[in-house]
Image: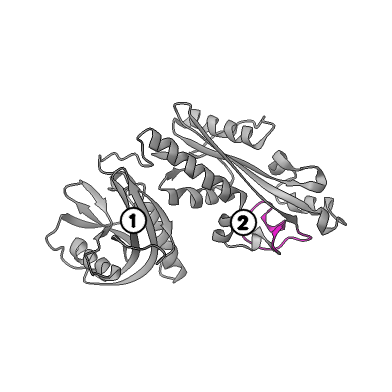
């Protein structure tokens, strides 16, 4: 199932993808018109944006309306945070308005209201808040908007990593609540987070740090060769897959990964790089898995197996994957690790 991100804010698009894709959602962008935000609350404006995008695309749409409320300014800029000042001037204007105000009177909080509207008219809404103070100066290069002047525990959101910010931010909290509500909504209807056009089992997953989940049942290998994705074609499924499978009794996860890589691709030589663990589930059960990136040095002939052939792709063929809602997420995690090593 595809979910459209209903925003034109580039910073939000990055955060939305980072928060939604680990849920197993297939997140897409569309060219959307901008509806007039006539609501008097964050929640009302989030609904206006999600409903307009859903009507325009015919797909489930997720939007949020968020902003900064400063105690000393009686809650301003609030729902007008995005229109508080011209682009690039919002933080400057706010700091000028608080000039001379002591720290104990600089309390503030962020609010994020998330709304998802489905084509059938159903709505899921969630909200998250986080509290802090307005710093005396802008600090940090990460994030966007007011992040570099919003301070918690002596650091601004602009000084936090993406992971640190997601763990404490208003949007991270809103999306955590949204995920639980979405799971309940889909499970109540016998639905899944994926819309599998091939008719195979629909799999969802949550990404976790490498080595954090035990016991391990599956191993997955995201393979790269000369800047391309290497996938194996499953004859019975009629679709493309990563290499991987069950970890045999007494077998180490890395040994299983290396065995599956050879059996399902014929690769002769590759470096296996640890990526992450994942918790996967579908209508038939759940299990933990471990993900590796294979930096292939030498290809080989494909042994006899359920895989009919292998192929190199410049881009993932999302509409022809066995697990289109999970495979792109795991490859994205693998690419992050390889980029950090200077190998992607």
Label 2 to label 1: alpha-carbon separation: 30 Å
Sequence order check, earlier mark of 2 and 1: 2
The N terminus lies in quadrant = top left
Q: Which mark is residue 35?
A: none
The C terminus lies in quadrant = bottom left
**Residue 106 x, y percent position in the rendering:** 80, 54
Q: How many marks?
A: 2
**Residue 60 x, y percent position in the rendering:** 46, 34
- Classed neighbour count for the residue bearing mark 2: other residues with Cα under 10 Å, few (<14), some (14–19), many (≥20): many
Most distant residue in the right direction: 100
Q: Residue at x 46, y 69 (%)?
A: 340
Q: Is residue 305 above or below residue 13?
A: below
Q: Residue at x 74, y 53 (%)?
A: 91
Of helix, strand and loop, which mostly describes the magenta segment?
loop
Depth order, front residue of 25/317: 25
The residue under label 1 is 314
- Note whether residue 296 is visible: no
- Note whether residue 237 is visible: yes
| SS label for mark 1 | loop
Query: Could you tell whether 73 is left or right of 200 in the image?
Result: right
Image quadrant where residue 301 sits: bottom left
Depth order, front residue of 194/137: 194
The residue under label 2 is 143
Most distant residue in the left direction: 304
**Residue 318 x, y percent position in the rendering:** 33, 47
Chain part drawn in magenta = 135-153
Q: Residue at x 41, y 39 (%)?
A: 2
Please say whether residue 149 is one of the residues in the magenta stretch: yes
């Amino acid at each position: 199932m595809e979910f459209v991100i209903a925003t034109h804010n580039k910073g939000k698009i990055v955060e939305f993808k980072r928060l939604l894709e680990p849920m197993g959602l297939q997140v897409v962008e569309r060219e959307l018109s901008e509806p007039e935000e006539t609501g008097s609350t964050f929640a009302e404006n989030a609904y206006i944006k999600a409903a307009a995008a859903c009507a325009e695309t015919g797909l489930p749409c997720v939007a949020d309306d968020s902003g900064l409320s400063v105690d000393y300014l009686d809650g301003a800029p609030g729902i007008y945070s995005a229109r508080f000042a011209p682009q690039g001037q919002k933080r400057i204007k706010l700091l000028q308005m608080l000039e001379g105000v002591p720290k104990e009177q600089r309390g503030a909080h962020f609010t994020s209201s998330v709304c998802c509207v489905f084509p059938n008219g159903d709505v899921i809404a969630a909200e998250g808040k986080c509290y802090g103070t307005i710093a005396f100066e802008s600090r940090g290069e990460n994030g966007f908007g007011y992040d570099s002047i919003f301070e918690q525990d002596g650091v601004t959101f602009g000084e936090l990593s993406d992971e640190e910010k997601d763990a404490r931010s208003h949007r991270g909290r809103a999306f955590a609540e949204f995920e639980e509500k979405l799971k309940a909504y889909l499970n109540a209807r016998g639905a899944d987070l994926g819309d599998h056009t091939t008719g195979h089992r629909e799999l969802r997953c949550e990404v976790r740090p490498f080595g954090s989940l035990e016991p391990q049942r599956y191993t997955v290998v995201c393979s790269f060769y000369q800047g391309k994705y290497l996938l194996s074609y499953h004859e019975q499924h009629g679709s493309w897959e990563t290499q991987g499978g069950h970890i045999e009794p007494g077998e180490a996860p890395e040994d299983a990964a290396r065995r599956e890589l050879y059996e399902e691709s014929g690769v002769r030589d590759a470096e296996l790089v640890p990526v992450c663990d994942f918790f996967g589930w579908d209508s038939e059960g759940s299990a933990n898995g471990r993900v590796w990136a294979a930096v292939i040095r030498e290809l080989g002939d494909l042994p006899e197996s359920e895989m009919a052939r292998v192929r190199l792709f410049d881009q993932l063929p999302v509409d022809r994957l066995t697990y289109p809602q999970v495979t792109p997420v795991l490859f994205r995690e693998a690419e992050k690790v390889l980029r950090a090593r200077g190998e992607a």
